[in-house]
Amino acid sequence: MRVKESAASQLKAPADPGRENFPSPWRGFVILGGSLFLAEFVVMICLPYLPELKPWVYNVADAALMLLLASPAGYFLVLRPLHHHIRERRRTEEELLLTNEQLRREIAVRRTAEGELVEAELRYRTVANFTYDWEYWETPEHALRYCSPSCERITGYSAPEFIADPKLQEQIIHPEDADLWRDHHHGALAAREAKIAEFRIRRKDGDIRWVEHTSQPVLGENGIFLGVRASNRDVTDRKIKELQTQQLRRELSHVTRVTTAGQLAASLAHELNQPLTAISCNAQAAERFLAFDKPELNEVQQALKEIWHDSQRAGGVIRQLRALFTKTSQQRSVVNFNEVIEGTLGLLRSELVLNGVSVQLELAPELPGLQGDRIELQQVVLNLILNALEAMTDLPPHRRRLRLCTKLEKSMGIQADFQDCGSGIPPAQLSRLFEPFFTTKPTGMGMGLTICHSIIEAHGGRLWAVNNRDRGATFHLMLPIHQKETV
Ligand code: ADP
Protein backbone atom coordinates (compact mmCIF):
# COMPACT_ATOMS: atom_id res chain seq x y z
CA MET A 1 0.00 0.00 0.00
CA ARG A 2 2.87 2.31 0.97
CA VAL A 3 4.53 1.49 -2.32
CA LYS A 4 1.44 2.63 -4.23
CA GLU A 5 1.15 5.80 -2.25
CA SER A 6 4.77 6.72 -2.73
CA ALA A 7 4.48 5.88 -6.41
CA ALA A 8 1.42 8.05 -6.71
CA SER A 9 3.17 10.84 -4.85
CA GLN A 10 6.04 10.68 -7.28
CA LEU A 11 3.71 10.71 -10.24
CA LYS A 12 4.46 13.69 -12.40
CA ALA A 13 1.86 13.20 -15.14
CA PRO A 14 0.67 16.33 -17.03
CA ALA A 15 -2.62 17.81 -15.78
CA ASP A 16 -4.29 16.91 -19.07
CA PRO A 17 -2.08 14.56 -21.05
CA GLY A 18 -4.45 14.27 -23.99
CA ARG A 19 -4.61 18.02 -24.56
CA GLU A 20 -1.51 18.36 -26.76
CA ASN A 21 -2.81 15.69 -29.13
CA PHE A 22 -6.30 17.16 -29.41
CA PRO A 23 -6.38 20.84 -30.62
CA SER A 24 -8.84 23.13 -28.90
CA PRO A 25 -12.31 22.60 -30.46
CA TRP A 26 -12.82 26.39 -30.76
CA ARG A 27 -9.62 26.70 -32.70
CA GLY A 28 -10.89 23.92 -34.98
CA PHE A 29 -14.21 25.58 -35.45
CA VAL A 30 -12.60 28.95 -36.24
CA ILE A 31 -10.20 27.36 -38.74
CA LEU A 32 -13.01 25.30 -40.32
CA GLY A 33 -15.45 28.22 -40.32
CA GLY A 34 -12.79 30.62 -41.65
CA SER A 35 -11.78 28.20 -44.41
CA LEU A 36 -15.39 27.69 -45.49
CA PHE A 37 -16.04 31.41 -45.40
CA LEU A 38 -12.94 32.07 -47.49
CA ALA A 39 -13.94 29.36 -49.95
CA GLU A 40 -17.50 30.80 -50.23
CA PHE A 41 -16.06 34.25 -50.62
CA VAL A 42 -13.77 33.12 -53.46
CA VAL A 43 -16.59 31.14 -55.07
CA MET A 44 -19.01 34.17 -54.80
CA ILE A 45 -16.46 36.38 -56.52
CA CYS A 46 -15.86 33.80 -59.26
CA LEU A 47 -19.55 32.80 -59.63
CA PRO A 48 -20.61 35.61 -62.12
CA TYR A 49 -17.93 34.33 -64.46
CA LEU A 50 -18.84 30.68 -64.12
CA PRO A 51 -22.75 30.53 -64.11
CA GLU A 52 -22.91 26.81 -64.93
CA LEU A 53 -21.33 26.08 -61.49
CA LYS A 54 -24.07 27.91 -59.55
CA PRO A 55 -26.30 24.93 -58.43
CA TRP A 56 -23.28 22.88 -57.44
CA VAL A 57 -21.83 25.77 -55.46
CA TYR A 58 -25.08 26.28 -53.56
CA ASN A 59 -25.18 22.60 -52.66
CA VAL A 60 -21.62 22.69 -51.45
CA ALA A 61 -22.33 25.85 -49.48
CA ASP A 62 -25.36 24.21 -47.82
CA ALA A 63 -23.29 21.16 -46.98
CA ALA A 64 -20.54 23.31 -45.54
CA LEU A 65 -23.05 25.20 -43.44
CA MET A 66 -24.52 21.93 -42.20
CA LEU A 67 -21.03 20.66 -41.40
CA LEU A 68 -20.26 23.85 -39.52
CA LEU A 69 -23.40 23.48 -37.41
CA ALA A 70 -23.03 19.74 -36.88
CA SER A 71 -19.38 19.69 -35.81
CA PRO A 72 -19.84 21.24 -32.26
CA ALA A 73 -22.56 18.72 -31.53
CA GLY A 74 -20.31 15.92 -32.80
CA TYR A 75 -17.47 17.24 -30.78
CA PHE A 76 -19.40 17.46 -27.47
CA LEU A 77 -21.31 14.22 -27.90
CA VAL A 78 -18.69 11.92 -29.39
CA LEU A 79 -15.20 13.34 -29.65
CA ARG A 80 -14.95 14.90 -26.19
CA PRO A 81 -16.05 11.76 -24.20
CA LEU A 82 -13.76 9.72 -26.46
CA HIS A 83 -10.85 12.07 -25.75
CA HIS A 84 -11.63 11.96 -22.05
CA HIS A 85 -11.67 8.17 -22.02
CA ILE A 86 -8.38 7.98 -23.89
CA ARG A 87 -6.81 10.55 -21.53
CA GLU A 88 -7.88 8.54 -18.45
CA ARG A 89 -6.46 5.34 -19.87
CA ARG A 90 -3.17 7.04 -20.63
CA ARG A 91 -3.00 8.49 -17.14
CA THR A 92 -3.70 5.09 -15.58
CA GLU A 93 -1.05 3.52 -17.79
CA GLU A 94 1.51 6.11 -16.77
CA GLU A 95 0.62 5.67 -13.10
CA LEU A 96 1.03 1.95 -13.48
CA LEU A 97 4.39 2.41 -15.15
CA LEU A 98 5.58 4.69 -12.37
CA THR A 99 4.32 2.35 -9.65
CA ASN A 100 5.97 -0.55 -11.40
CA GLU A 101 9.28 1.30 -11.58
CA GLN A 102 9.02 2.25 -7.92
CA LEU A 103 8.26 -1.34 -6.94
CA ARG A 104 11.22 -2.57 -8.96
CA ARG A 105 13.47 -0.11 -7.11
CA GLU A 106 12.10 -1.12 -3.71
CA ILE A 107 12.55 -4.80 -4.47
CA ALA A 108 16.16 -4.10 -5.46
CA VAL A 109 16.75 -2.20 -2.17
CA ARG A 110 15.14 -4.99 -0.16
CA ARG A 111 17.22 -7.63 -1.93
CA THR A 112 20.40 -5.69 -1.14
CA ALA A 113 19.34 -5.38 2.54
CA GLU A 114 18.53 -9.09 2.70
CA GLY A 115 21.91 -9.89 1.19
CA GLU A 116 23.65 -7.69 3.75
CA LEU A 117 21.67 -9.37 6.53
CA VAL A 118 22.69 -12.83 5.37
CA GLU A 119 26.30 -11.63 5.08
CA ALA A 120 26.21 -10.13 8.62
CA GLU A 121 24.63 -13.30 10.03
CA LEU A 122 27.31 -15.38 8.35
CA ARG A 123 30.02 -13.07 9.70
CA TYR A 124 28.77 -13.17 13.30
CA ARG A 125 28.04 -16.88 13.20
CA THR A 126 31.50 -17.57 11.85
CA VAL A 127 33.05 -15.49 14.63
CA ALA A 128 30.83 -17.06 17.31
CA ASN A 129 31.35 -20.59 16.07
CA PHE A 130 35.11 -20.18 15.94
CA THR A 131 35.56 -18.56 19.36
CA TYR A 132 38.24 -20.29 21.33
CA ASP A 133 36.27 -19.84 24.57
CA TRP A 134 32.98 -21.59 25.17
CA GLU A 135 30.22 -19.02 24.77
CA TYR A 136 26.55 -19.47 25.46
CA TRP A 137 23.35 -17.52 25.91
CA GLU A 138 20.91 -18.80 28.53
CA THR A 139 17.33 -17.54 28.48
CA PRO A 140 15.46 -16.53 31.67
CA GLU A 141 13.70 -19.93 31.36
CA HIS A 142 17.13 -21.66 31.62
CA ALA A 143 17.15 -22.90 28.02
CA LEU A 144 20.27 -22.42 25.89
CA ARG A 145 19.57 -20.05 23.03
CA TYR A 146 23.10 -20.36 21.70
CA CYS A 147 26.06 -22.53 22.56
CA SER A 148 29.36 -22.24 20.70
CA PRO A 149 30.94 -25.43 19.33
CA SER A 150 34.09 -24.70 21.39
CA CYS A 151 32.25 -26.23 24.37
CA GLU A 152 33.39 -29.57 23.00
CA ARG A 153 37.07 -28.59 23.22
CA ILE A 154 36.67 -27.59 26.88
CA THR A 155 34.12 -30.10 28.19
CA GLY A 156 34.11 -32.98 25.71
CA TYR A 157 30.34 -32.50 25.27
CA SER A 158 28.96 -31.10 22.02
CA ALA A 159 26.77 -28.02 21.65
CA PRO A 160 23.65 -30.08 20.70
CA GLU A 161 24.16 -32.14 23.89
CA PHE A 162 24.15 -28.95 26.00
CA ILE A 163 21.15 -27.52 24.14
CA ALA A 164 19.18 -30.77 24.50
CA ASP A 165 19.85 -31.06 28.25
CA PRO A 166 19.87 -27.73 30.12
CA LYS A 167 20.92 -29.54 33.34
CA LEU A 168 24.15 -30.89 31.79
CA GLN A 169 25.93 -27.62 32.49
CA GLU A 170 25.35 -27.99 36.23
CA GLN A 171 26.07 -31.72 36.20
CA ILE A 172 29.65 -31.29 34.99
CA ILE A 173 30.58 -28.91 37.85
CA HIS A 174 33.04 -30.49 40.31
CA PRO A 175 31.07 -31.53 43.45
CA GLU A 176 33.34 -29.39 45.68
CA ASP A 177 32.53 -26.30 43.60
CA ALA A 178 28.82 -27.02 43.22
CA ASP A 179 27.75 -24.53 45.92
CA LEU A 180 29.93 -21.81 44.51
CA TRP A 181 28.50 -22.44 41.04
CA ARG A 182 24.90 -22.35 42.31
CA ASP A 183 25.52 -19.09 44.20
CA HIS A 184 27.18 -17.56 41.19
CA HIS A 185 24.50 -18.75 38.79
CA HIS A 186 21.59 -17.48 40.89
CA GLY A 187 23.48 -14.27 41.56
CA ALA A 188 24.13 -13.74 37.84
CA LEU A 189 20.44 -14.16 37.04
CA ALA A 190 19.34 -11.85 39.84
CA ALA A 191 22.06 -9.21 40.02
CA ARG A 192 21.88 -8.06 36.39
CA GLU A 193 25.59 -7.24 36.31
CA ALA A 194 28.74 -8.92 35.03
CA LYS A 195 30.10 -11.58 37.41
CA ILE A 196 33.22 -13.72 37.36
CA ALA A 197 33.81 -17.05 39.03
CA GLU A 198 36.43 -19.77 38.80
CA PHE A 199 35.53 -23.41 39.32
CA ARG A 200 36.38 -26.92 38.23
CA ILE A 201 34.46 -29.07 35.78
CA ARG A 202 34.64 -32.78 35.04
CA ARG A 203 35.07 -33.39 31.31
CA LYS A 204 33.24 -36.17 29.47
CA ASP A 205 36.47 -38.22 29.59
CA GLY A 206 36.71 -37.69 33.38
CA ASP A 207 39.51 -35.10 33.29
CA ILE A 208 39.22 -32.18 35.71
CA ARG A 209 39.64 -28.71 34.18
CA TRP A 210 39.58 -25.22 35.69
CA VAL A 211 37.19 -22.77 34.05
CA GLU A 212 37.06 -18.99 34.39
CA HIS A 213 33.41 -18.15 33.90
CA THR A 214 32.21 -14.62 33.11
CA SER A 215 28.49 -13.99 32.91
CA GLN A 216 26.73 -10.87 31.77
CA PRO A 217 23.02 -10.08 31.54
CA VAL A 218 21.53 -9.61 28.08
CA LEU A 219 19.14 -6.67 28.08
CA GLY A 220 16.79 -5.95 25.19
CA GLU A 221 14.92 -2.77 24.34
CA ASN A 222 13.59 -0.91 27.39
CA GLY A 223 15.91 -2.96 29.59
CA ILE A 224 13.93 -6.19 29.20
CA PHE A 225 15.96 -9.08 30.62
CA LEU A 226 16.66 -11.62 27.88
CA GLY A 227 18.89 -13.97 29.86
CA VAL A 228 22.58 -14.34 30.56
CA ARG A 229 25.49 -14.48 28.14
CA ALA A 230 28.43 -16.43 29.48
CA SER A 231 32.00 -16.99 28.42
CA ASN A 232 33.98 -19.94 29.75
CA ARG A 233 37.76 -20.03 29.43
CA ASP A 234 39.89 -23.06 30.17
CA VAL A 235 42.43 -21.70 32.69
CA THR A 236 43.74 -25.05 33.91
CA ASP A 237 47.41 -24.36 33.06
CA ARG A 238 47.33 -20.94 34.72
CA LYS A 239 45.51 -22.35 37.75
CA ILE A 240 48.03 -25.16 38.20
CA LYS A 241 50.87 -22.62 38.12
CA GLU A 242 48.98 -20.41 40.57
CA LEU A 243 48.40 -23.32 42.92
CA GLN A 244 52.07 -24.30 42.68
CA THR A 245 53.09 -20.70 43.45
CA GLN A 246 50.65 -20.61 46.37
CA GLN A 247 52.11 -23.86 47.66
CA LEU A 248 55.65 -22.48 47.40
CA ARG A 249 54.60 -19.27 49.11
CA ARG A 250 53.02 -21.23 51.91
CA GLU A 251 56.19 -23.31 52.35
CA LEU A 252 58.32 -20.16 52.43
CA SER A 253 55.85 -18.44 54.68
CA HIS A 254 56.01 -21.38 57.06
CA VAL A 255 59.82 -21.29 57.12
CA THR A 256 59.85 -17.57 57.93
CA ARG A 257 57.19 -18.05 60.61
CA VAL A 258 59.33 -20.69 62.27
CA THR A 259 62.37 -18.39 61.99
CA THR A 260 60.44 -15.46 63.46
CA ALA A 261 59.12 -17.58 66.28
CA GLY A 262 62.71 -18.71 66.90
CA GLN A 263 63.74 -15.05 67.25
CA LEU A 264 60.98 -14.64 69.80
CA ALA A 265 62.03 -17.66 71.81
CA ALA A 266 63.40 -15.59 74.73
CA SER A 267 60.36 -13.39 75.09
CA LEU A 268 57.99 -16.34 74.54
CA ALA A 269 59.75 -18.26 77.28
CA HIS A 270 59.23 -15.22 79.46
CA GLU A 271 55.61 -14.95 78.37
CA LEU A 272 55.04 -18.58 79.38
CA ASN A 273 57.18 -18.39 82.48
CA GLN A 274 55.11 -15.61 84.01
CA PRO A 275 51.79 -17.48 84.24
CA LEU A 276 53.58 -20.73 85.16
CA THR A 277 55.35 -19.01 88.07
CA ALA A 278 52.06 -17.43 89.14
CA ILE A 279 50.33 -20.83 88.93
CA SER A 280 53.04 -22.41 91.04
CA CYS A 281 52.87 -19.61 93.68
CA ASN A 282 49.07 -19.74 93.83
CA ALA A 283 49.12 -23.55 94.17
CA GLN A 284 51.58 -23.32 97.08
CA ALA A 285 49.48 -20.59 98.72
CA ALA A 286 46.32 -22.66 98.37
CA GLU A 287 48.07 -25.63 99.95
CA ARG A 288 49.11 -23.45 102.91
CA PHE A 289 45.58 -22.01 103.33
CA LEU A 290 44.22 -25.56 103.40
CA ALA A 291 46.82 -26.67 106.00
CA PHE A 292 45.48 -24.19 108.58
CA ASP A 293 43.53 -25.63 111.49
CA LYS A 294 40.67 -23.62 110.17
CA PRO A 295 41.25 -23.72 106.38
CA GLU A 296 40.79 -20.32 104.66
CA LEU A 297 38.45 -21.57 101.99
CA ASN A 298 37.82 -18.11 100.49
CA GLU A 299 41.54 -17.60 99.92
CA VAL A 300 41.83 -21.08 98.46
CA GLN A 301 38.96 -20.26 96.08
CA GLN A 302 40.68 -17.01 95.00
CA ALA A 303 44.00 -18.82 94.45
CA LEU A 304 42.26 -21.46 92.32
CA LYS A 305 40.59 -18.73 90.26
CA GLU A 306 43.96 -17.14 89.53
CA ILE A 307 45.47 -20.53 88.71
CA TRP A 308 42.68 -21.05 86.18
CA HIS A 309 43.19 -17.56 84.73
CA ASP A 310 46.98 -17.99 84.38
CA SER A 311 46.64 -21.44 82.86
CA GLN A 312 44.26 -19.94 80.26
CA ARG A 313 46.82 -17.26 79.49
CA ALA A 314 49.63 -19.82 79.06
CA GLY A 315 47.33 -22.03 76.99
CA GLY A 316 46.53 -19.04 74.73
CA VAL A 317 50.23 -18.39 74.09
CA ILE A 318 50.80 -22.05 73.27
CA ARG A 319 47.79 -22.16 70.94
CA GLN A 320 48.98 -19.06 69.05
CA LEU A 321 52.48 -20.52 68.82
CA ARG A 322 51.22 -23.86 67.62
CA ALA A 323 49.17 -22.13 64.94
CA LEU A 324 52.27 -20.30 63.75
CA PHE A 325 54.35 -23.46 63.69
CA THR A 326 51.76 -25.74 62.18
CA LYS A 327 52.03 -26.19 58.46
CA THR A 328 48.41 -25.96 57.39
CA SER A 329 46.95 -25.57 53.94
CA GLN A 330 45.40 -22.20 53.30
CA GLN A 331 42.22 -21.89 55.31
CA ARG A 332 39.97 -19.02 54.48
CA SER A 333 37.32 -17.97 56.94
CA VAL A 334 35.72 -14.78 58.16
CA VAL A 335 38.44 -12.93 60.03
CA ASN A 336 38.18 -9.85 62.19
CA PHE A 337 41.36 -7.89 61.60
CA ASN A 338 41.17 -6.18 65.02
CA GLU A 339 41.29 -9.63 66.62
CA VAL A 340 44.31 -10.54 64.50
CA ILE A 341 46.16 -7.46 65.81
CA GLU A 342 45.11 -8.08 69.41
CA GLY A 343 46.09 -11.78 69.20
CA THR A 344 49.53 -10.91 67.82
CA LEU A 345 50.06 -8.25 70.50
CA GLY A 346 49.27 -10.98 73.05
CA LEU A 347 52.17 -13.02 71.67
CA LEU A 348 54.50 -10.03 71.69
CA ARG A 349 53.57 -8.58 75.08
CA SER A 350 56.82 -9.61 76.80
CA GLU A 351 58.88 -8.48 73.81
CA LEU A 352 57.21 -5.06 73.92
CA VAL A 353 57.56 -4.75 77.68
CA LEU A 354 61.23 -5.82 77.63
CA ASN A 355 61.97 -3.23 74.92
CA GLY A 356 60.03 -0.52 76.75
CA VAL A 357 57.77 0.13 73.74
CA SER A 358 54.49 1.88 74.43
CA VAL A 359 51.71 0.81 72.09
CA GLN A 360 48.93 3.18 71.07
CA LEU A 361 46.00 1.10 69.87
CA GLU A 362 43.28 2.81 67.82
CA LEU A 363 41.06 0.04 66.51
CA ALA A 364 37.86 0.91 64.68
CA PRO A 365 34.85 -0.46 66.57
CA GLU A 366 32.60 -2.87 64.70
CA LEU A 367 35.04 -3.58 61.92
CA PRO A 368 33.37 -5.94 59.41
CA GLY A 369 34.89 -9.38 58.96
CA LEU A 370 36.90 -10.19 55.85
CA GLN A 371 37.54 -13.45 54.02
CA GLY A 372 41.10 -14.50 54.80
CA ASP A 373 43.59 -16.86 56.32
CA ARG A 374 43.94 -15.88 59.98
CA ILE A 375 47.42 -17.37 60.42
CA GLU A 376 48.82 -15.69 57.32
CA LEU A 377 47.36 -12.33 58.33
CA GLN A 378 48.79 -12.79 61.80
CA GLN A 379 52.18 -13.44 60.23
CA VAL A 380 51.95 -10.12 58.39
CA VAL A 381 51.07 -8.23 61.57
CA LEU A 382 53.87 -10.00 63.48
CA ASN A 383 56.44 -9.13 60.80
CA LEU A 384 55.42 -5.49 60.61
CA ILE A 385 55.50 -5.05 64.40
CA LEU A 386 58.88 -6.82 64.78
CA ASN A 387 60.36 -4.66 61.99
CA ALA A 388 59.05 -1.54 63.75
CA LEU A 389 60.62 -2.68 67.04
CA GLU A 390 63.95 -3.26 65.32
CA ALA A 391 63.79 0.17 63.64
CA MET A 392 63.41 1.79 67.09
CA THR A 393 66.31 0.02 68.87
CA ASP A 394 68.54 3.12 68.57
CA LEU A 395 66.03 5.22 70.52
CA PRO A 396 66.01 5.36 74.33
CA PRO A 397 63.21 3.02 75.62
CA HIS A 398 60.93 5.84 76.81
CA ARG A 399 60.77 7.27 73.26
CA ARG A 400 59.85 4.01 71.53
CA ARG A 401 56.24 4.39 70.46
CA LEU A 402 54.18 2.22 68.16
CA ARG A 403 50.78 3.30 66.88
CA LEU A 404 48.46 0.66 65.43
CA CYS A 405 45.20 1.73 63.94
CA THR A 406 42.41 0.23 61.83
CA LYS A 407 39.65 1.97 59.94
CA LEU A 408 36.94 1.13 57.47
CA GLU A 409 37.40 2.79 54.08
CA LYS A 410 33.88 2.27 52.72
CA SER A 411 34.64 1.78 49.04
CA MET A 412 38.06 0.12 49.44
CA GLY A 413 37.86 -2.13 52.50
CA ILE A 414 39.77 -2.25 55.76
CA GLN A 415 42.90 -0.16 56.20
CA ALA A 416 45.46 -0.83 58.92
CA ASP A 417 48.41 1.45 59.73
CA PHE A 418 51.60 0.43 61.58
CA GLN A 419 53.37 3.64 62.55
CA ASP A 420 56.71 3.70 64.37
CA CYS A 421 59.11 6.46 65.30
CA GLY A 422 62.25 4.57 64.31
CA SER A 423 64.98 5.26 61.79
CA GLY A 424 62.64 5.61 58.80
CA ILE A 425 63.45 4.30 55.33
CA PRO A 426 66.02 6.04 53.07
CA PRO A 427 64.00 7.29 50.01
CA ALA A 428 66.22 5.30 47.61
CA GLN A 429 65.26 2.10 49.42
CA LEU A 430 61.51 2.70 49.50
CA SER A 431 60.95 1.01 46.13
CA ARG A 432 63.12 -2.00 47.02
CA LEU A 433 61.53 -2.84 50.39
CA PHE A 434 59.36 -5.65 49.03
CA GLU A 435 62.04 -7.20 46.80
CA PRO A 436 63.12 -10.69 47.87
CA PHE A 437 66.33 -10.75 49.95
CA PHE A 438 66.46 -6.97 50.37
CA THR A 439 67.76 -6.29 53.86
CA THR A 440 69.80 -3.66 55.66
CA LYS A 441 70.28 -5.80 58.76
CA PRO A 442 73.52 -7.73 59.29
CA THR A 443 71.64 -10.92 60.14
CA GLY A 444 68.48 -10.17 58.16
CA MET A 445 67.06 -12.53 55.55
CA GLY A 446 65.16 -9.89 53.57
CA MET A 447 62.15 -12.15 53.04
CA GLY A 448 59.77 -10.82 55.72
CA LEU A 449 58.27 -7.97 53.72
CA THR A 450 58.28 -9.99 50.47
CA ILE A 451 56.13 -12.62 52.15
CA CYS A 452 53.88 -10.01 53.77
CA HIS A 453 53.39 -8.41 50.36
CA SER A 454 52.49 -11.68 48.67
CA ILE A 455 50.11 -12.66 51.50
CA ILE A 456 48.27 -9.35 51.26
CA GLU A 457 48.16 -9.59 47.45
CA ALA A 458 46.76 -13.13 47.71
CA HIS A 459 43.98 -11.60 49.82
CA GLY A 460 43.29 -9.08 47.04
CA GLY A 461 44.80 -6.22 49.08
CA ARG A 462 47.73 -3.82 48.98
CA LEU A 463 50.73 -3.19 51.26
CA TRP A 464 52.87 -0.07 51.00
CA ALA A 465 55.21 2.05 53.13
CA VAL A 466 55.82 5.78 53.60
CA ASN A 467 58.12 7.82 55.79
CA ASN A 468 56.48 9.90 58.53
CA ARG A 469 56.81 13.70 58.49
CA ASP A 470 58.71 13.88 61.76
CA ARG A 471 60.49 10.54 62.07
CA GLY A 472 59.98 6.84 61.53
CA ALA A 473 57.93 5.01 58.94
CA THR A 474 54.35 3.84 58.51
CA PHE A 475 53.32 0.63 56.78
CA HIS A 476 49.78 0.73 55.41
CA LEU A 477 47.76 -2.22 54.32
CA MET A 478 44.39 -2.32 52.64
CA LEU A 479 42.27 -5.46 52.56
CA PRO A 480 39.04 -5.75 50.57
CA ILE A 481 35.96 -7.01 52.36
CA HIS A 482 34.47 -8.53 49.22
CA GLN A 483 36.67 -10.53 46.91
CA LYS A 484 36.38 -12.24 43.54
CA GLU A 485 34.55 -15.55 43.84
CA THR A 486 37.22 -18.21 43.66
CA VAL A 487 37.52 -21.63 45.17
P1 ADP B 1 64.65 -8.30 57.25
O1 ADP B 1 63.89 -7.86 58.46
O2 ADP B 1 65.15 -9.71 57.34
O3 ADP B 1 65.72 -7.33 56.84
P2 ADP B 1 62.31 -7.53 55.83
O4 ADP B 1 61.83 -7.91 54.46
O5 ADP B 1 61.36 -7.70 56.93
O6 ADP B 1 63.63 -8.33 56.04
O7 ADP B 1 62.75 -6.01 55.78
C1 ADP B 1 63.56 -5.54 54.72
C2 ADP B 1 64.16 -4.24 55.08
O8 ADP B 1 63.17 -3.22 55.14
C3 ADP B 1 64.81 -4.19 56.42
O9 ADP B 1 66.13 -4.70 56.37
C4 ADP B 1 64.80 -2.69 56.75
O10 ADP B 1 65.89 -2.03 56.12
C5 ADP B 1 63.56 -2.22 56.05
N1 ADP B 1 62.45 -2.00 57.01
C6 ADP B 1 61.45 -2.83 57.25
N2 ADP B 1 60.60 -2.30 58.17
C7 ADP B 1 61.10 -1.10 58.50
C8 ADP B 1 60.67 -0.06 59.41
N3 ADP B 1 59.55 -0.17 60.15
N4 ADP B 1 61.45 1.06 59.48
C9 ADP B 1 62.54 1.17 58.75
N5 ADP B 1 62.99 0.22 57.87
C10 ADP B 1 62.27 -0.89 57.76
Image (cartoon, rainbow, N blue to C red):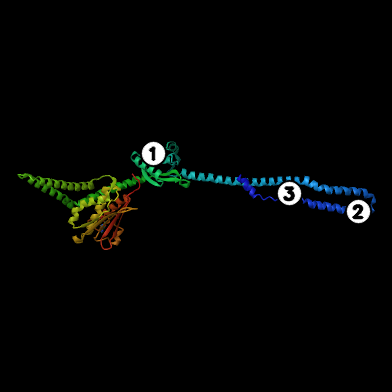
> Percent from the top left, x then y, of residue 393?
20, 59
Q: Which residue is mark 3?
A: 18
Earlier residue among tags 3 and 1: 3
Q: Amino acid at mark 1?
A: Glu
Q: Nearer the viewer, mark 2 or mark 1?
A: 2
Q: Is residue 174 left or right of residue 2?
A: left
Q: Residue furthest left?
A: 293
> Badge 1 local density, few (<14 within 10 Å), some, or many (20+)?
some
Q: Amino acid at mark 3?
A: Gly
> Percent from the top left, x then y, of residue 135?
43, 43
> Is the residue marked 1 within 8 Å of ligand 1, measured from its CB?
no
> Badge 2 local density, few (<14 within 10 Å), some, or many (20+)?
some
> Badge 3 local density, few (<14 within 10 Å), some, or many (20+)?
some
Q: Which residue is mark 2?
A: 44
> Percent from the top left, x then y, of residue 201?
37, 40
Q: Nearer the viewer, residue 369 or 60?
A: 60
Q: Nearer the viewer, mark 2 or mark 3?
A: 2
Answer whether labels 2 and 3 touch (C-beta < 8 Å).
Answer: no
Q: Which quarter of the rendering shows the N terminus? A: top right
